[in-house]
Image (spheres, helix red, strand yellow):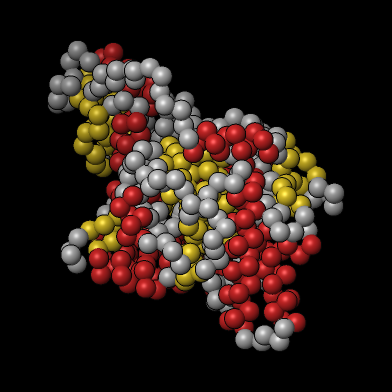
Amino acid sequence: MRTTVVRSAVAAVSALVLAVTGVAWDQYTNLSDGLHRSAALGSGSGTSTGTDTNILVMGLDSRLDENGDPLPAAVYDAMHTGASDVGGYNANVLILLHVPGDGSRATAMSIPRDDYVSLAGVPDGQSKGKIKQAYGLAFDQEHKQLVAQGVTDAATLEQRSRDAGRTSEIATVRQFLGGVPVDHFVEVTMVAFYQLAQVVAPITVCLAENTQDSYSGANFHQGYQQLDAAQALAFVRQRRDTVHPSLNFTDLDRERRQQAFIASLAFQLKQAGTITDPTKLQGLIDVAKQNIAVDDGLDLLQFAQQASGLAGGNVTFTTLPIEKFGKDPLGEDVNIVDVAQVQATVARLLNPAAPTSAPAAPAAPLGTVDVLNATGRTGLAATVSQTLAGDGYTAGSTGNTARRASTVVHFPAGAGAAAAALAGTLGTSHTTEDGTVAPGHLEVVLGAGFTLPATSSATPTPAAAPTSALDGISGGGIPCVK
């Protein structure tokens, strides 16, 4: 039926661009017919058992579009990433999305781009390197071979070289992760991320500290803030702080940024009604058709039926472990990995153990919280309401009110202890009894400069140092990160 609304997981933002949007049937056909399709997956990528699906998302460092053409100068200026000759065909974002066929929680595994691994097929004669390099090395090798064979058509050279890069990257990832099947892939260019952010901006994110970086153009304050497209790109690209060196940024923090951004965007797409806005929906589809490539076997409608829970937060993001930072034989910075540990981790994530005991009884609701925004920052009341819901409160009404300096919790008679507990969660000590607040409710008025404290269960603070432990972000909200 043309009026049937379906859930379509199209790609991921730098990692899952267009993560789970709802598309009417005619729009689905428009998208499916216009995507770049590739046969690079081949028959050597394995097939998941049952109805499970594994999708490898590859975000390219290239400053070119999917056809290999340069972008308008104004786009390069806005992206703050250098011109068309900067970057290359490295797969700087690698995320394996595992969607269980039974509808249970999906897992998005980020593979740090500088993991030093064996490269499948020895592309360009290189047996080991950073995992991101498999794409570019195979692209270069194929491009040189085609030119030597007399191929001169630019489009043919570009697409056949890209297919070689895709095949090599997929094979290298599979080998590194222990032979896991890759059922489908999605390839995203850097400009696709920027254009997506233009369509859906402003985008709300949350930072645990003030941070600034002249390389990426990042300049953010602590707490929740709304970003335009250029700022969003800086947010996911930042891997250093040129003003606060004590923050000790690493590439692992950039992985966390990407995960947090995807979680925030999916939450906002659902909350803001983007998928019911014809103009924005068409904008999302246009971005996908211009700058995203997928394997020729990906049936968007079938996958939509399987992955409808992702937009609702039914996904956990995690970064695969590294052992330490080190140098390769050429002196370049790399991540030293314990391959056996990585493969064991992936195996656990793909095949979680069944619970051995009955689940604990759910905690009693902590009460209904109404949130009023007195900061002037658009969308903050809804964000805080959702975050408190994650902490066990029931989401009440949200709205805006006159500006005020401090945050305060209003409570009805007899609810002083509950108000104090909520105030502590919000990082304030101001509470006041208010006879206009309904029984069973608490009312929060957010004052200027409000930020959720890092101890909130919905705002985990990532570790800056390398770690062998899983460090996950849950979907369904706007997490705070470094």
- Please identify the quadrant where the C terminus is shown: top right
Give the vertical position of 300 relative to 399 (above or below): below
Decide if residue 141 is on the left or right side of residue 29: right
Decide if residue 270 is on the left or right side of residue 211: left
Asked if one can make out residue 13 in the rendered structure from this viewpoint, the answer is no
Give the vertical position of 422 relative to 174 (above or below): above
Q: Residue at x 22, y 33 (%)?
A: 396
Rendered location of residue 293, percent (x, y): 49, 66
Asked if one can make out residue 114 in the rendered structure from this viewpoint, the answer is yes
Rendered location of residue 379, percent (x, y): 33, 46
Decide if residue 39 is on the left or right side of residue 432: right
Rendered location of residue 49, percent (x, y): 44, 45
Give the vertical position of 270 relative to 281 (above or below): above
- Please identify the quadrant where the N terminus is shown: bottom left
Viewer-closest of 464 and 357: 357
Q: Residue at x 46, y 67 (%)?
A: 296
